[in-house]
Image (tube, grey):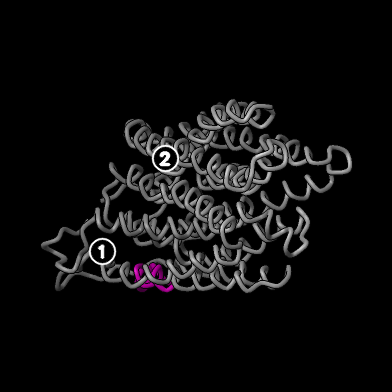
Amino acid sequence: MTDAAANPRQSRPNVVLAMLLVVYIFNFVDRQILSILAAPIQADLDLSDAEMGVLGGLAFAILYSTLAVPLAALADRTSRSWVITVSLVLWSGFTAACAAAQGFWHIFLARLGVGIGEAGGVAPSYALIGDYFPSNRRAFALSIYSLGIPLGSAAGVLAGGYIAARVDWRMAFLAVGILGILIAPVFRLLVRDNRPQVAAGEPVIDKPRLSETARMLAKKPAFWFLSFGAASSSMCGYGLAFWLPSLLQRSFGLTLVEAAWFFGLVLLIGGVAGMLLGGWIGDRLGGRDRAWFAWVPGAAFLIGAPLFALGIMSGSVMLAFALFILPQALVYVWLGPVLSAVQHLVPPPARATASALFLLINNLIGLGGGIYALGQVSTLLTPIYGDEALRYSMLLGLTLYLLAGLLMLLAGPKLRKGWVEEA
């Protein structure tokens, strides 16, 4: 890693991490706000659970997942910070555009635009963290960055719920979209790329092309186990996160604002604890044996699934809240260790592209399929279970966490062989 003396234009690592976290918070505010606004949107636009599942999953995931790969390759070969800045402006603008939706296809196209913008945000951010933080601190740094998921989700749920309750759902979209646009120039001012500087006379290292990175990863079983394990967990996790506010209103009798507080606190308490714990444990155990970067998440998924089931089937709001906290922490443990491991399956210049290929599998399956699947199963079960159909749909979805746990355990030994040490 280049030091400040060798690269005088380098930003401070902690400032970079803080700004990346702020941008990631906006990323998840814009994603998660749709879940708390699902009920008023459905009432206003006359949408079914299956249609809301499309809006929350496929409408966002189609271009978000596929465009992330070429945009990450562009970031690897040009400027990672510029790609993130432009992406932030795009996804925030399309979030604001959701406020003008008059029907299913209007809001579908706006969510498609949000996915286009967010496609250029995450993988280049992972790579910037890899550039600024050494290997023995990277899992924890990635966990700090990943706090954007619970913090942004909680902020989206709480802000969206309050604004919708006091004004309407359209104003909620407009407000968070404008805030994201305003933060973009601040980010660009404070965050610079941290490329290794080549001294005079030294050969310039060619940056690997997308096809080269893809071939490199395709030969490593660890990449496939990690990717499909993460995708299975994300399919369940995104589905639960999107539909839990609706479950709280239908089956537990909470108001929109009460559901926002319930879910927001679960995300903040459980999510933050799980993120930090996963990164801390991953760095320490993974430093001794690379397999622990996968084994720690695997164990967390296997323990978390039955605890989630108890919470979903609980008849008490307070008991459900207590039961959701621990598994919410456990299912967030994977991010720091797994994201760090994926970056070590390729040489440093290919980090953003490798991360994007991982995210392609994770998000296309996890984000694209999970939310829609739970919504569709709920619609199919409604004639049998009525308002309780969503509860049973979510319960069936928990089997995906068990599959994720198994795949992560299988990935452990393969990581030892596929790991690329840094010079």
Q: Residue at x 51, y 73 (%)?
A: 93
The residue lying furthest to the right in this view is 383
Identify the disc placed on residue 42.
none
Return the x and y of residue 301 as percentages of the image width and height.
55, 33
Residue picked out by circle 1: 194
Q: Nearer the viewer, mark 2 or mark 1?
A: 2
Relative to residue 284, is residue 363 drawn left or right? right
Relative to residue 311, is residue 206 drawn left or right? left
Q: Amino acid at mark 1?
A: Asn
Q: Main secondary structure of the magenta part?
A: helix
**Which of the two discs, 2 and 1, labels the residue nearer the N terminus?**
1
Relative to residue 342, is residue 319 drawn left or right? right
Q: Give the quarter of the image for residue 419.
A: top left
- 295, above or below 259, in the image: above
Identify the disc placed on residue 272.
2
The magenta stretch is 74-86
- 89, above or below 404, in the image: below
